[in-house]
Image (cartoon, rainbow, N blue to C red):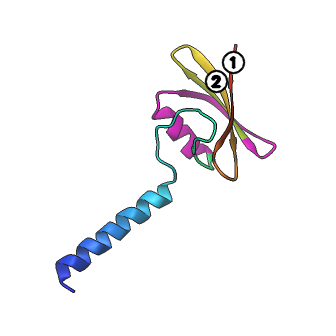
Amino acid sequence: MSNKFTTTLFASAFSLTGLLAAGPAAAVEPVIGAQVGTDTAAIERAFAESGYSVRKIEKEYGRFEIYLDRDGRRLEVKVDQTTGKVVAVELED
């Protein structure tokens, strides 16, 4: 194997490992089934990159409850702590 090929292969594998370790892709909309993450930092980053302000994140009954604002609209989003998927979305009054 050439040295150039080995270096390229290693760099590609390293980059892919970094992407997988970072978790789900950022910038998601709060819809049921969306993958947003299994920790508060990943969840906050994903919604913030979609233009949402994260007002609060609480843990309750195996779920994260995330309170979001965007364009005058307030949402309560529930995310399963194990899978990191959105399981419920409610529009707040």
Residue found at x 53% / y 34% = 47
Q: Residue 14: where, in percent of width, then height?
A: 37, 68
Alpha carbon distance from label 1 to label 2:
5 Å
Residue at screen point 24% across, 71% down: 8
* Picture residue at 51% right of the left edge, 16% below the top: 71
75 above or below 1?
above
Q: Answer yes or no: do the residues labelled 1 and 2 have beta carbons within 8 Å? A: yes
Which label was assigned to residue 76?
none
Mark positioned earlier in the residue sequence (1 or 2): 2
For image coordinates 62% across by 48% down, the residue present is: 39
Q: Quadrant of residue 79?
A: top right
Which residue is nearer to you in this view: 58 or 33?
A: 33
Three-letter code, disc 2? Leu
Does 69 appear in magenta? no
Neighbor class of circle 2 (other Cα within 10 Å; few <14, some 14-19, many 20+) is many
Q: Residue 32, position in %: x, y?
A: 64, 36
Give the residues in magenta: 40-63
Q: Is residue 68 left or right of residue 28?
A: right
Q: Is residue 1 above or below residue 91?
A: below
- Residue 75, image x and y in percent? 64, 23
Q: Residue 92 shows which numbered tag?
A: 1
Task: Please name the residue that numbered disc 2 is placed on.
Answer: 75
Residue placed furthest toward the bottom = 1
Say if the magenta span includes residue 57: yes
Badge 2 element: strand
Other-residue count near label 1 (Cα within 10 Å), few / some / many at <14 / 14–19 / ≥20? few
- SS at badge 1: loop
Q: Hey, what amino acid is under mark 1? A: Glu
Residue at the extreme right of the image, as rendered: 61
Rendered-image quadrant of the C terminus: top right
x%, y% of residue 78?
70, 36
Image position of 52 (left or right of 59): left
